[in-house]
Amino acid sequence: MTALGSIPNSSAQTSNTGLEDIEYKTKEEHATLGRDDFMKLFVTQLQYQDPMNPMESAEMASQVAQFNMVDLMYKNNAALESMTNAQNMAASVTAISLLGHRVEYEGSKIFVSDKGVEPFSIFNDQDVQAVDVKASIYSPAGNLVKELNIGPLEPGQEVSLEWDGTDTNGDKAHEGAYTVSISAEDASGQEVELTTKTMGMVSGIENGKDGFPKITIKGDKAIDFKDITKVES
């Protein structure tokens, strides 16, 4: 004879958890309790509770509140995912419009074309003065082309690199992507790391791993869309 309130063996064999009809796409989903899992467990608990010792109203209210919280979290996650997808799509549309345009971004390349030298700037984003700033320009092959004395840079100060596109002999540099190396020290002789900004032509767009587009710069590395600081009209 089965005790009052206990689960018969036949029921226990056919529905131990009440989760048999939930389908999982991956092992990771099976290892994590979701909204449907929570609801199945809650309903099964009510179905097999001891009639002589039913669940207290406060305990039931607590579990219902937990279920509502889980449901709200799922809805919030869905809303955030939808918002992120919309932002990524808007960023991709904007990125496509940049094809063929010159943009400013943090980088160490300075470009020489038939029109001359592209803008390049040096920014002191540190809280100390850089008293001895120098710029060394290297050819695409890695050979030193020219060295320039920039002078002191105050905290927050930004200056343009004044290079006329010639080497140390006064000969005109060939077209291409040159590399600028900046060295700087403070008053005590300690190295100061400065930020350099350059202008480059957008030649391609691709999707990044985070869903945001990556911008391919002609002659330079691909950069993140959010790293662009200015677009030339």
Image: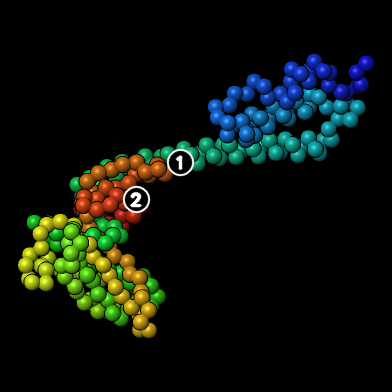
x then y, percent, for residue 45: 77, 28
Quadrant holding the N terminus: top right
For image coordinates 29% across by 65% down, the residue present is: 196
Front-most of residues 26 and 200: 26
> Can you tell which quarter of the image residue 31 is in?
top right
x then y, percent, for residue 73: 60, 40
> Can you tell which quarter of the image residue 153 is in?
bottom left
Left or right, residue 211 beside residue 217? right
- Residue type pointed to by label 2: Asp
Query: SS class of the residue under badge 2?
Result: strand
Q: Are marks 2 and 1 in contact (CB under 8 Å)?
A: no
Left or right, residue 35 beside residue 98? right
Which residue is labeled 1 in the image?
83
Q: First in sequence: mark 2 or mark 1?
A: 1
- Residue type pointed to by label 1: Met
Front-most of residues 10 and 199: 10
Which residue is labeled 2 in the image?
224
x then y, percent, for residue 218: 21, 50
* Label 2: few (<14), some (14–19) or many (≥20) C-alpha neighbours in 10 Å: some
